[in-house]
């Protein structure tokens, strides 16, 4: 049955047309008729095929984008969006994690600098007052799509040159024998600020996961403090549970 006929079949439903269209598309994704990464027809083609307005199609697509079912790539079109599952027990950098999933990790750098540690960083790392740290602030992308806004801090004593970080912080630390081997991670649900929404390409107030990670060397030295805001419509944290 075509999309047009499926939409006609719901004609007796008082639900707005765009919501009925969204429900049909959502079900096709669920059944695998539209696979992850597959491109949808253009808004114009869908509107002509189903004899509805482009506004109706756009509202249906926008609804599914807010739900995380679809994603839009600038100048390319609308696609069925993947969701990324991160096991909460795995200590891996963003680049390494995405590479393992067959995705291309990228960064849009916002800051890469050396600065005086803030009071809370002095306490967290156990640093002397006026110690220097390296700051890395960037938008992390998966296959070109913004996924997280990340702010990482590393003591200068652990990473002397911030330019050493090209794409992967963990690769730069590993190269000098300072890659974390254990970590503590805290995940909280929150809403995107206006700035975060702008960087992540989501509406202000969209769901985000705030993740704070502290990475440690084998001797207990803390080498990393990373605070990130991940898009809640793209990222899931998964935990394996076992009977005690």
Image (cartoon, rainbow, N blue to C red):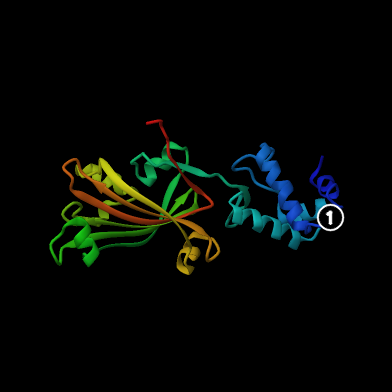
Q: Quadrant of residue 17?
A: bottom right
Q: Quadrant of the N terminus?
A: top right
Q: Name the residue at 48% across, 63% down.
A: 192
147 and 18: which is toward the camera: 18
Q: Quadrant of the C terminus?
A: top left
Give how far across and how far down residue 42 sits, in percent: 71, 53
Farthest-out residue, top: 243
Farthest-out residue, left: 128
20 and 114: which is toward the camera: 20
Q: Quadrant of residue 14?
A: bottom right
Give how far across and how far down residue 11 sits, in percent: 86, 52
The secondary element bearing badge 1 is classed as loop
| 89 sits left or right of 161 in the view | right
Q: Name the residue at 27% across, 47% down.
A: 215
Give how far across and how far down residue 23 sits, in percent: 72, 49
| 24 sits left or right of 209 in the view | right
Q: Name the residue at 15% across, 59% down.
A: 127
Farthest-out residue, bottom: 194
Judge the density around disc 1: few (<14), some (14-19), many (≥20) Cα neighbours within 10 Å: few
Give how far across and how far down residue 228 sits, in percent: 39, 56
Q: Quadrant of residue 183?
A: top left
Whether 49 is drawn above or below 110: the answer is above
Question: Number of marks in the image?
Answer: 1
184 and 215: which is toward the camera: 184
Disc 1: which residue: 51
């Amino acid at each position: 049955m075509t999309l047009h006929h499926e939409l006609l079949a719901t004609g007796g439903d008082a639900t707005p047309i765009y919501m009925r269209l969204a429900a049909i598309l959502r079900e096709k994704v669920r059944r695998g008729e539209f696979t992850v990464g597959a491109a949808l027809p253009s808004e114009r083609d869908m509107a002509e095929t189903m004899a509805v307005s482009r506004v109706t199609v756009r509202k249906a697509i926008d609804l599914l984008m807010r739900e995380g079912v679809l994603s839009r790539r600038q100048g390319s079109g609308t696609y069925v969006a993947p969701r990324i599952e991160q096991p909460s027990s795995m200590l891996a950098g963003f680049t390494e994690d995405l590479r393992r999933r067959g995705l291309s990790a990228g960064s849009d750098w916002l800051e890469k600098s050396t600065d005086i540690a803030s009071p809370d960083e002095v306490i967290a790392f156990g640093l002397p007052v006026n110690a220097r740290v390296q700051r890395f602030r960037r938008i992390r992308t998966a296959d070109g799509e913004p996924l997280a806004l990340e702010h990482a801090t590393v003591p200068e004593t652990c990473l002397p040159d911030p330019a050493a970080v090209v794409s992967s912080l963990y690769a730069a630390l590993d190269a000098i024998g300072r890659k974390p081997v254990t970590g503590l991670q805290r995940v909280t649900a929150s809403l995107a600020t206006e700035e975060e929404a702008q960087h992540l390409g989501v509406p202000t107030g969209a769901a985000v996961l705030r993740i704070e990670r502290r990475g440690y060397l084998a001797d207990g030295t803390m080498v990393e403090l990373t605070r990130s805001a991940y898009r809640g419509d793209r990222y899931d944290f998964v935990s394996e549970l076992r009977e005690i």
